[in-house]
Amino acid sequence: MYPVLFRWGSVSFYTYGLFTALAVIAVFLTAAGRARRAGLPQGVVMDLVLLFFVSGVVGARFFYILQHWPDYAGRPERMLAIREGGLVWYGGFAAAVLSGVVTARLKRWPVLALADFFAPLLPLGHAIGRIGCFLNGCCYGRVTKSFDGMVFPGDSFRRLPVQLYEAAALLILSFFLFFLFRRKRQPGEIFLSYLLFYGAMRFGAEFLRGDQVPVFYLTLPQWMSGALFLGAAVLLWVVRSRRA
């Protein structure tokens, strides 16, 4: 693990922050290259990338602090120490979607077309961020004796590198959604496909995590993933039945 990339005097540069920046750059450049081919104004797409980044980081950090409130109640100065890690995907996703929908509705942009456009980019950026989690040593897996187990900072035993498993699965999902985008689909179908497959993937990955506490037999992300999967499945069925 390499949580600190390098130090310059008293200032530390964190690997987690670097990969968060790389994720944003990758999404920005890919979106810029695809906008015209998708028939969307490049300026609109770029504005939304910036909006998603800002609102996503705020939402992800806010949700993380809520989950770990005892660690921050007496140390408010640490609430902004994002470069060290501490973002929750579902919090960031909810904030980004809400801000995107409200902005698109106010400006009369095509909500479903934009949702489909960004659907393959979400797992792409998420995959890069998961590599940052691995190097930072957060979001670790359960204890194992498996050959692929790794020793994380502060441990003397091996854990599953579940961050890398998730990164690989997210890249596969991203490529699959890019493939779907090239085919004619009902508006919103690609975005719903992302919700469906990500919900299933995250639900399964949580069984390999070692940093979550079960709530009624499942972790909080599993409950959220299950609800996401079921909701997306119902909506996808409705969309496809209209096409038929």
Image (spheres, rainbow, N blue to C red):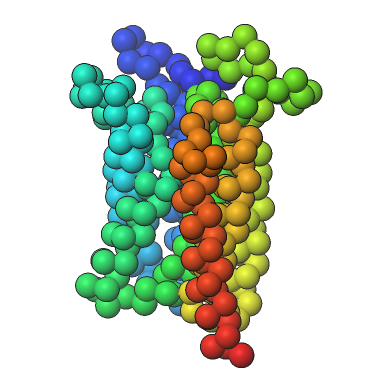
Drawn side of residue 70 relative to residue 6, left or right: left
Image point 30% across, 36% down: which residue? 66
Image point 48% across, 44% down: which residue? 221
Residue 175 spot, x, y in % from top left: 64, 58
Front-lying residue, 211 or 84: 211
Drawn side of residue 3 relative to residue 57, left or right: right
Q: Could one spot residue 135 in this view of the protein? A: yes
Image point 65% across, 67% down: which residue? 179
Q: Could one spot residue 26 in this view of the protein? A: no
Which image quadrant for residue 130? top right
Most extreme residue toward the right is 147
Q: From what the image shows, is residue 39 above or below residue 20?
A: below
How many marks on residues?
A: 0
Question: The N terminus appears in which quarter of the rendering?
Answer: top right
Q: From what the image shows, is residue 177 above or below residue 160?
A: below
Drawn side of residue 200 relative to residue 216, left or right: right
Residue 195 spot, x, y in % from top left: 52, 61
Residue 12 spot, x, y in % from top left: 37, 17
Question: The C terminus appears in which quarter of the rendering?
Answer: bottom right
Image point 47% across, 38% down: which residue? 215
Most extreme residue toward the bottom is 244
Front-lying residue, 130 or 11: 130
Residue 189 spot, x, y in % from top left: 53, 74
